[in-house]
Image (cartoon, rainbow, N blue to C red):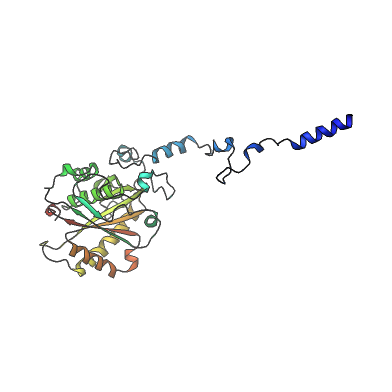
Amino acid sequence: MHGTLRLLGLLALLLSPACGDDDSSPADDGGVDVPVEVAEDVTPDLPAEAEADADAEADVGPDVGPDADSFDEAEVEAGADVEPDAGPDADVPAEAEADVPADALDGFGTLSGACGVLDDAEWTSSSPFLFRGSIDFGTTAYDPALLSEGAREILADGTAGGSSGESEAISYDVLYRCELAALLLSETEIAYDPPTSVKTDYLSSIDARNVGVSVTRAYRYPPSEPCLESSLATLLERKLRDCRTSQANAAPANPWGRSILHVIAYSAQCADATEAAYATLDAAVRSDVILYLTVTDGDDAFLY
């Protein structure tokens, strides 16, 4: 009798399910359920400093400008560092990762052509890149009030020399609307070592990366005259070299890891000549700098 009872008990143990096996069977869709204790906690503990940095980097939405939470001008004036390039794995919100339509943000003029084109393919490569778009001001008279907040700040801060304030403001406005750029420092706020270095026109943040932007214009005086490829080749070579020099000489307080040369072209003919001139330059001259070409149409006399 006792032997029979022991045999029945052994059979009961063999037929009962093991602990935890209830969740191990494949789900109806072919997947495997993850135990609750694993799914609830997949993020390792971070030091307080790292958590604070992550919170700061996460605020890079499309509504940014000189007052964005990711940058504090008062800290820069006090000698604090501007955050260097965050790298391709930075925590960027979905709005910044997606392609940006030309009319994503309101502003002065109608944008078309290349827009929302800058991503890791450009940031992580030293190959030459050229993107071409256009802005049409129509018959609307130029009014700085129509520009983005960052563009207005560029105008208010002034430039290091010359009368290129409007072209720099329009350049920023285009990058703000197309690439969700945020203004970090205007031309007169960027520090260099040595201080006599050639200058970059403004420092921006695009895709959580510090990007120096230099602006030049492709036109011939009087503007009705056609642009010459030879003259533009000379201009581009000098400006591209200056981009690399200013980036190399940027002070540790405001570094950047990629440069854009933004060419504002008076007409499609001047833009075509710019592209042709650019193609003649040595690859070493064109490398490491992104060429962003914008043709202006409509009532654009204020730029030239």
- Depth check: 97 or 219 in front? 97
Residue 20 percent location from the top left of the image: 66, 36
Which quadrant: the N terminus? top right
> Which residue is at the front of the view, 205 or 138?
138
Residue at 60% of width from left, 44% of height from top? 26
The residue lying at 29 percent from left, 50 percent from top is: 101
Asked whether residue 252 is in view, the answer is no
Q: Which quadrant of the rendered structure holds the C terminus?
A: bottom left
Report the number of discs. 0
Can you say whether 192 is above or below 293 in the image? above
Question: Is residue 216 among what the camera can see?
Answer: yes
Q: Position of residue 213 (x, y in %)?
A: 28, 53
95 or 240: which is nearer to us? 95
Q: Identify the image quadrant of residue 129.
A: bottom left
Q: Residue at x 31, y 42 (%)?
A: 62
Q: Is residue 132 left or right of residue 300?
A: right
Q: Residue at x 16, y 41 (%)?
A: 145
The residue closer to the viewer here, 287 or 81, is 287
Residue 211 in the image, given as x and y percentages of width and height: 33, 51
Determine which quarter of the picture holds residue 128. bottom left
Name the spot of residue 10 as percent of width and height, x first: 81, 35
Q: Left or right: 28 with respect to 107?
A: right
